[in-house]
Image: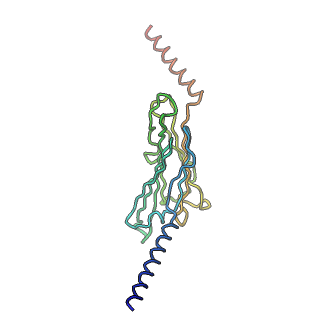
Amino acid sequence: MKKHLTMYAVALLTIGLLLSTATQADALLVDVSITFDTLTSGRAVVSGDFDDTFLDPAINEKNISAVGAHWRYDVRLFRFRDPAIENFFNYSMFIQSRHISNPPPHSGETTPGLLLGGAGELSYTSLKTQGIFDTRSHSLVHPGGDGDKDSVFSRIDDLNGNDAGFLTLDNQVSATIDTFHTVPEPATVFLTAGGLMGLMGIRRWVNS
């Protein structure tokens, strides 16, 4: 009898472990993956399920990253309990990027570039009631360059049929992050050069 009970217990334990493993394998964790990565442009995709990502009730923050040869993408995920509704959570997502090409695209530029989205320009929260499918962007002049800019553009893919919020009703997310390293337009360079020449001319006229 004892032998049969022991075998039964072992069988139940094995089934439990298999079910647990299958559940974890089926979990669709939020992840960021790079789809292309070049010296002057890149793209990453964020997708997954917030509920699967925060299965452990003790965890309220996740940091995920994807690093290529030229661009780095960092995504921070947060979960916080809504005090007004029992067992209800709100979610937030912050996107950041940085140009890390080494050597950088142009002589004189330093690497890595400045942090894009560092002040929360590319932030999303499930508390928002309006649709947020517009493209958000942030640009900074790459240090050491002649006005060349690093830019990041993020867009939430509308999986809800234009419903509000950056998550679907079952807390799925899908977002695209595009990054670019752009040189100033010729007209901008011409105007800048012309302005400098004008200032030099004024200085000479004043000195004379």
How was the colour assigned to the protein in this rendering? rainbow
Measuring from the top left, give residue 120's x and y in whole percent.
Answer: 44, 48
Query: Which quarter of the image is occupied by the C terminus?
Result: top left
For residue 129, above or below residue 69: below
Q: Residue at x 44, y 33 (%)?
A: 110
Query: Which quarter of the image is occupied by the N terminus?
Result: bottom left
**Which residue reaches farthest front?**
3
Q: Nearer the viewer, residue 81 or 116?
A: 116
Q: Residue at x 59, y 62 (%)?
A: 160
Measuring from the top left, give residue 158's x and y in whole percent.
Answer: 59, 57
**Which residue reaches farthest right?**
161
Q: Residue at x 42, y 84 (%)?
A: 7
Measuring from the top left, give residue 81's x and y in whole percent.
Answer: 41, 65
Q: Nearer the viewer, residue 149 or 105?
A: 105
Q: Nearer the viewer, residue 201 or 56?
A: 56
Q: Nearer the viewer, residue 80 or 72?
A: 72
Measuring from the top left, give residue 54's x and y in whole percent.
Answer: 44, 64
**Which residue reaches farthest top?**
208
The quarter holding residue 60 reads bottom left
- Figure disc tally: 0
